[in-house]
Image (tube, rainbow, N blue to C red):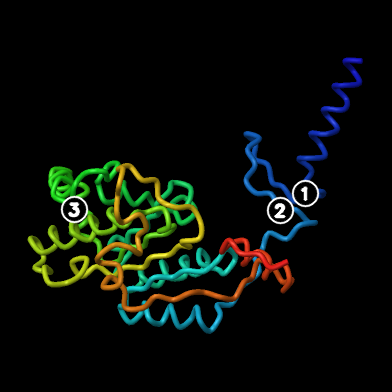
């Protein structure tokens, strides 16, 4: 029995480490340097941006602040990746900060959470208290001075109050250091993405008036353009798309 198991294990090892079968190269220390399956292509297909997505990219290249929304499967994250690349070419990599309201969303863009970037902790204090907190945090204070373009993904989970507070912090810090007091967000180019039909903010205070980010006092003034992506790539069945869009909006026609 033991010999049979040993033989099976050796056979499996030889099969998995076979260069002829899997295209694997193994070093003398038995660490895999590269593995290329002959059955599955590792090349990602090139996806072209739509005309609408290219228009958004052009607007951002012109220095505009943009809010991008759309249902799941409309290419928001894919477009953001192109936008981030473009922003880094314009402003320099160190001056573009990529954030999201959640850790998972931030990881998908190789960024950090919005609260971490801003240095506001839970963000449940008044704007003045939050500004004092950030001013005492040298790293956060330096980030606010350094940033030229700020990307925020999954905005649906950011409350209107937090959005207003962040704008106040940006304007206050940058007016002191850079003389940008009259400019919204202290002159930062803002690229915000998300779908307000998805997860809502987690409200820390009872009776909070501005639940959603679009209810913030500074919302409309923050953007030169607000655009909804409408082409869905994830599904091709028109009837299924119609059904899913109805569910998204809480409507269903039988």
Residue 174 rendering spot, x and y as whole percentages: 14, 62
Q: Mark 2 sits on what residue?
A: 36
For image coordinates 72% across by 47% down, the residue present is 24
- Kindly indicate whether the residue at mark 2 contacts the one at mark 3 (C-beta within 8 angstroms): no
Q: Mark 1, mark 3: which one is toward the viewer?
A: 3
Q: Secondary structure at mark 2?
A: loop
For image coordinates 40% across by 54% down, the residue present is 100
Residue 61 rendering spot, x and y as whole percentages: 36, 79
For image coordinates 91% across by 21% down, the residue present is 4
Residue 50 rendering spot, x and y as whole percentages: 56, 80
Q: Which mark is residue 22?
A: 1
Q: Mark 3, mark 2: which one is toward the viewer?
A: 3
Compared with 99, 228 (above or below) is below
In space, the residues marked 1 and 3 are separated at their CA atoms by 49 Å
- Kindly indicate whether the residue at mark 3 contacts the one at mark 1 (C-beta within 8 angstroms): no
Say which quarter of the image contains residue 221. Answer: bottom left
Dot 1, crowdedness within 10 Å: few (<14), some or many (≥20)?
some
- Kindly indicate whether the residue at mark 1 contacts the one at mark 2 (C-beta within 8 angstroms): yes
| Position of residue 204 in the picture relative to residue 126 (left or right) | right
Q: Which mark is residue 236?
A: none
Q: Secondary structure at mark 1?
A: helix
């Amino acid at each position: 029995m033991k010999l049979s198991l040993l033989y099976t294990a050796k056979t499996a090892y030889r099969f998995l480490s076979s260069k002829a079968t899997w295209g694997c190269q193994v070093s003398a220390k038995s660490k895999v340097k590269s593995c290329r399956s002959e059955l599955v292509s590792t090349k990602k297909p090139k996806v072209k941006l739509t005309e609408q997505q290219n228009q958004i990219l052009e607007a951002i290249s012109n220095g505009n602040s943009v809010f991008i929304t759309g249902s799941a499967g409309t290419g928001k994250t894919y477009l953001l990746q192109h936008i981030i690349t473009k922003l880094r070419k314009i402003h320099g990599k160190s001056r573009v900060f990529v954030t999201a309201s959640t850790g998972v969303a931030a990881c998908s863009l190789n960024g950090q959470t919005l609260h971490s970037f801003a240095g506001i902790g839970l963000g449940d204090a008044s704007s003045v208290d939050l500004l004092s907190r950030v001013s005492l945090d040298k790293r956060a204070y330096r980030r606010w001075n350094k940033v030229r373009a700020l990307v925020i993904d999954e905005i649906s989970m950011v409350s209107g109050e937090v959005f207003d507070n962040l704008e106040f912090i940006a304007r206050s810090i940058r007016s002191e250091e850079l003389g940008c007091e009259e400019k919204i967000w202290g002159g930062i180019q803002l690229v915000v993405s998300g779908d307000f039909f998805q997860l809502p903010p987690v409200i820390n205070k009872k009776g909070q008036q501005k639940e959603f980010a679009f209810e913030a006092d500074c919302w409309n003034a923050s953007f030169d353009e607000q655009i909804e992506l409408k082409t869905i790539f994830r599904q091709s069945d028109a009837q299924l798309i119609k059904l899913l869009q109805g569910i998204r909006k809480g409507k269903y026609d039988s």
